[in-house]
Amino acid sequence: MDLERVGVLLVGVGLAVALLSAVAFGFVWGSTEVFCEDHDPSYSFAGVDGASIQYADGCNTHSVNPLVTSGALLAVAGVVVGGGGVLREWSTAD
């Protein structure tokens, strides 16, 4: 199978996993529930815990669903693999 086809397959499966798991289970996997009075949110990257990305809003910490993160990474891998296949095809074209 050509690298372009593998890339398209990876992008499709990655987007399907990310979107379906976000709809079925929710985008946010878990978060702290702290009440902050007069809070002006400022979002920032808080870290990575396994396959889950964590971000903070200045008061609470939220974790992204690991299936959404894995699906997005699979889609990015598909773009890279497909792009490599296109570049290889361009370099060998006469």
Image (spheres, grey):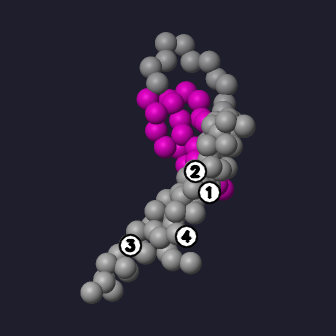
The CA span between labels 2 and 1 is 6 Å
The kind of residue on which mark 3 rests is Val
Q: Which residue is mark 4?
A: 6
Q: Which residue is mark 2?
A: 15
Q: Which residue is mark 1?
A: 13
Mark 2–mark 3 CB contact (< 8 Å): no
The kind of residue on which mark 2 rests is Leu
Residue 17 on image: x %, y %: 65, 50
| Residue at the top extreme of this rendering | 38
Q: Secondary structure under badge 3? A: helix
Quadrant occupied by the N terminus: bottom right
Mark 3–mark 1 CB contact (< 8 Å): no
Q: Secondary structure under badge 4? A: helix
First in sequence: mark 3 vs mark 1: 1
Which of 69/80 is in front? 80
Q: Which residues are magenta?
A: 42-63
Residue 94 on image: x %, y %: 27, 87
Q: Secondary structure under badge 2? A: helix
The kind of residue on which mark 4 rests is Val
Which of 71/34 is in front? 71
The CA span between labels 4 and 2 is 14 Å
Mark 2–mark 1 CB contact (< 8 Å): yes
The kind of residue on which mark 1 rests is Val
Q: Which residue is mark 3?
A: 86
First in sequence: mark 1 vs mark 4: 4
Q: Is residue 42 visible?
A: yes
Tag nearer the camera, 4 or 2: 4
Q: Secondary structure under badge 1? A: helix
